[in-house]
Image (spheres, rainbow, N blue to C red):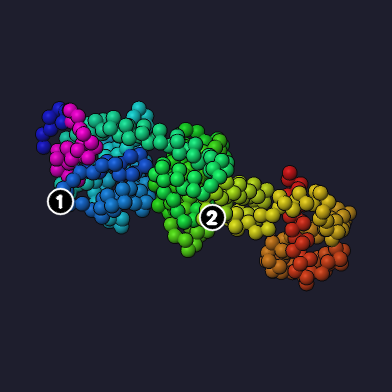
Amino acid sequence: MTHYDDPFRGDFDSLEEFADRISDLLQCPITIEDANHRLIAYSAHDDYTDPARTATIISRRVPEKVINSLWKQGAIPALLSSREPVRVASISEVGLGSRVAVSIWKNDEVIGFIWALETDRALSKEDMELLKKAAKAAKNKVLQLHMRKNKKEERVQEFFWKLLTGHMATEEEIKESFKAMQIPTAPLFSVIIFRFANEITKEIEKQISYSLQTTQQIQLLLYTTDQSDVILLAAPKTTNQPLKEFTCFIESFATKMKERFHISSIQSGFGGIYETYTCIEKSYKQALTVLKMKEKFPAQLNRVHGYEQLGIYQFFDLLLQKTQQGEFGNSALRKLQSYDEKHHTDLVETFETFFDRDCNVNETAEALNIHPNTLAYRLKRIAEIGEIDLHDINQKVKLYIDIKLAKYEALH
């Protein structure tokens, strides 16, 4: 196939017209995506397409399972590091036929991709060169979309901070703003925070944005960054098991950031799940509480992400305040602490571990590396010294909470 020097000379009214032009020249279906794999144009009147392309056109975004496969195969890492076209072999498990892709660059940043689906023939070297020219010609059109999107995002960011800080008082006002900015609403939502080990740089922010924009595990309504925090307003896909959906998303996000961008040590927490948008500030504060408690009790809360999963740790700030004011006290704990200090024993730790293990003797003995008989003796001594009835759940719970509070207070 012979192409003249500049087949893209002249203006195109739209990116759709531009996609049609590439398709006419290469005789194959074309799709154009932004940097987050959202569809922005595709060629019309194609005789053939594959399931992955069909799903992309219907939902206006590349399915997450396809993106994951392209990362594993190495296609997306190659596109993010090269200006050369990349040949992608078919991946039948996700309905992806063989194709060639090229990145659209603005200086050192990828702002989009052009995909050419190989139908009845493989693209030649000449075709590859034409794709490179198409990528250069597409830059300005894609950049215009990119800049318009950035301007809108600035307004949206300001709106989100008003919500997080409680500066919008009524549900009606909030919903009107959602509608005016064309932001979807959902019947349930929560605020999720990812806390990174260091302050988020511009480069890391792009990687975070990519991971968030390409996920289809949850509905992402709004997001922003604050120093080392990424803050999301997210909705579950269904209302059946929102806690499970958020937990799965959080764990998946952390895994992908590590595998794709080598970023680890991400702490996470989400607030209460609410129906009314005036509760966004409350959910945000609760997510911050989760992160605070996980920092203070890393071993105990390692697998906890949600405020509703904190259990007794939800109440610690309030209880600590009351304790410091002298309203609460625990003579049993004071006696045990005094005995441990005087005799170099570990009765307080023994009781805490026993309760941590749901009063399971064998698990507690194993955790403390002692014989079950030794544990039985220590529990007997705890009951005697602390003058506490270990068959009374109320006394046991009170002692357990006060042990945790004492630890929490020592960390302040």
- Mark 2 is surrounded, within 10 Å at the Cα level, by few (under 14), some (14 to 19) or many (20 or more) other residues, namely some
Q: Say which amino acid is labelled 2.
A: Tyr
Circle 2 or circle 1, nearest the eye: 2
Left or right: 390 as drawn, with respect to 78: right
Quadrant of the drawing holding the C terminus: top right
Quadrant of the drawing holding the N terminus: top left
Number of marks drawn: 2
Front residue of 114 and 158: 158
Say what secondary structure mark 1 lies in: loop
Which residue is identified by label 2?
274
Front residue of 314 and 373: 314
Residue 140 is inside the magenta segment = no
**In the rendered view, would you say 134 is above or below 171?**
above
Left or right: 314 as drawn, with respect to 176: right
Residue 16 is inside the magenta segment = yes
**In the rendered view, would you say 170 is above or below 244?**
above
In this rendering, does residue 66 appear at all?
no
Front residue of 289 and 160: 160
The percent coordinates of residue 87 (x first, y second) are 26, 43
Q: Residue at x 78, y 70 (%)?
A: 392
The percent coordinates of residue 97 (x first, y second) are 24, 51
Disc 2 to disc 1, C-alpha distance:
47 Å
Q: Residue at x 54, y 55 (%)?
A: 273
Q: Residue at x 31, y 48 (%)?
A: 60
The percent coordinates of residue 89 (x first, y second) are 26, 48
Left or right: 299 as drawn, with respect to 29: right
Residue 47's disc is: 1
Earlier in the chain: of badge 2 and badge 1, it is 1
- Residue range (magenta): 8-29
In this rendering, does residue 388 appear at all?
yes
Q: Say which amino acid is labelled 1.
A: Asp
- Mark 1 is surrounded, within 10 Å at the Cα level, by few (under 14), some (14 to 19) or many (20 or more) other residues, namely few
